[in-house]
Image (tube, helix red, strand yellow):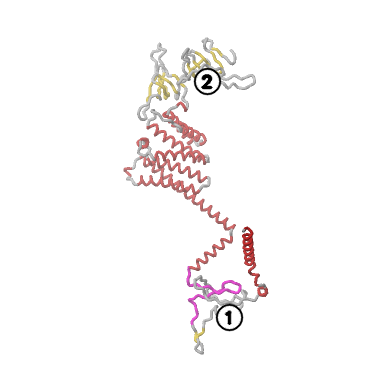
Amino acid sequence: ESHHNCRDHSDRHSHTIRTSMKPLYQPEDADQAIVQTPYGRGLVIRTRKADNIKEVQLLEWESFANPNGARQTHPFMLYTDRDYPSVPPRVGDDVVCLYGRGRVTGIAGVPNNNESNSKTSNLKYSITLSSWRMNGRSDVTCQVTYPPPRVVRKHILSEMDAHQKVELALSQKLKATHYFQKKDYNLALTTFASAVDAVRNVQHDHTSTNEVRADLVVVMVTCSNNAATCCIKLEKWDEASKFAKNALILLDALYGKKRMKIHTILNKEGTIDARLFGEWRVKSYLVVSRSCMAQGEDEDTIAVLKKAKAIAMEYIDHINAKEETDVSTEEKASLKGLTSQMKEVRRLLVECSGRMKATKEKEKKRAKAMFGSSSNKEQAIEKKKEVEEDPKQTIPPPKENGETGAAISSDSTAKDVPQENGADVVPETPYNLPFVRKSSLNNKHRDRSIKKTVSFSRRPPQVKEYEKTNNNDDEDSPWYAEHKEAIIMMAVAGLSVVTFMGLRKVYR
């Protein structure tokens, strides 16, 4: 025997060759059996009908090492016409029995009273048939003792029908839930995502019942939301938002088909609207809001949270409006879940609003630091508005240096005092007193009883005109010093007009 060829000495027609040799083309078997060969477990790929030659891939054949030390990567194949027995079935294996294809769900021992009959099996196999379909969700289970079922290869995803894909996704969901409870979020995310991928591109046919379609919606929505929750735990914000939005798309599509067959089936089985369109949608919106909040998109976060709040309050008010005797057990459970979600929505709204206020305050401080003069102008405008609200205030006369001096209110004007000669005396006010230069240093004995008031009334007060101080520089300056710019502009304009007229004469 060589490393590349091995012969079965019990059969002249049996030999193994490497897959580099091209066998005759034959379609693969629909149910590829797993058999026990003299060289270990083997998978029957195809059977040639002309001479019953079987192409068997050896699953346990270790590849030989090449002289250069590299490992052999090609599988070894066995070609034989012998019918090798099947490997012993185990729970969970796909098998083929007298009644069709199915999966082993249980194995029990059976007492064998007739020891002479070697054909009688002492094991009883419980098989759930997948090749049988009944109305609703009923499964067909059979008990097989003899002949024992033959183990076959499991179908890959592309070979499954809609019912098998939904079953695969449900089994993946159970595994992922177990991983999530153990806080293994990476493995839970991978398993939830594989469940979603298993039913993403389901092609329905005549075997797809309404119950299968309803299960498809449930497993897609729940696995998408759970995968989004795992992404939140792992701080994968973009992926979390994508999973949650996929769930919202499915729920919105189903909401548009309310009262139809799939929606009716879900309601009958206990998935009420408060759970379907309430809890599940709010859960998706919460995931999207957390993703936006983590990325600093506070305005989008508040918009999403408002949608979640409106949905939660709609179903909470609907359940609370009923009498206590009319509320079902499912509605009580949904009310509890929605109330918990509502608390989370309010907490996130408060947190996001506080963040937005803090951000605005920081921006105002930066603006004040950069443009301090503008803030002073704003304060001056505010003071003017406060003064305009009091109509009894008057404008004081200006001082020599331009500052506003003390003013006397119109209500506090002095009364007429008679003199010895009977003439009335005009009360002395800052408007008719002779001008006296005052210094800010001699301001200790100022009358504190006079109130400083300011008015911006439409009627201007009569203010005493002060004589301007003589400025020798202004008197000596020529008359055109103040109008240089105007004279230059007029000269340029005149020159332009003359040039234009001259060009017109030339071209004529």
Mark 2 or 1, nearer chain start? 2
Q: In the rendered image, is residue 306 in sight?
A: yes
Nearer-the-camera pick, 394 or 25: 25
Q: In the rendered view of the protein, which quadrant contains the C terminus?
A: bottom right
Q: Is residue 184 above or below residue 453?
A: above
Outermost residue toward the bottom in this view: 421
Say whether residue 398 is magenta.
Answer: yes
Question: What is the secondary structure assignment of the residue under circle 2?
Answer: loop
* Residue pointed to by mark 1: 434
Front tag of 2 and 1:
1
Nearer-the-camera pick, 37 or 372: 372
What's the amino acid at mark 2? Leu
What's the amino acid at mark 1? Pro
* Residue pointed to by mark 2: 59
For the point 44% across and 42% down, the residue is 283
Q: CA distance from mark 2 to mark 1?
A: 122 Å
Question: What is the secondary structure assignment of the residue under circle 1?
Answer: loop
For the point 54% across and 10% down, the residue is 9
> How many residues crowd around disc 1 within 10 Å: few (fewer than 14), some, or many (20 or more)?
few
* Prevalent SS, magenta region: loop
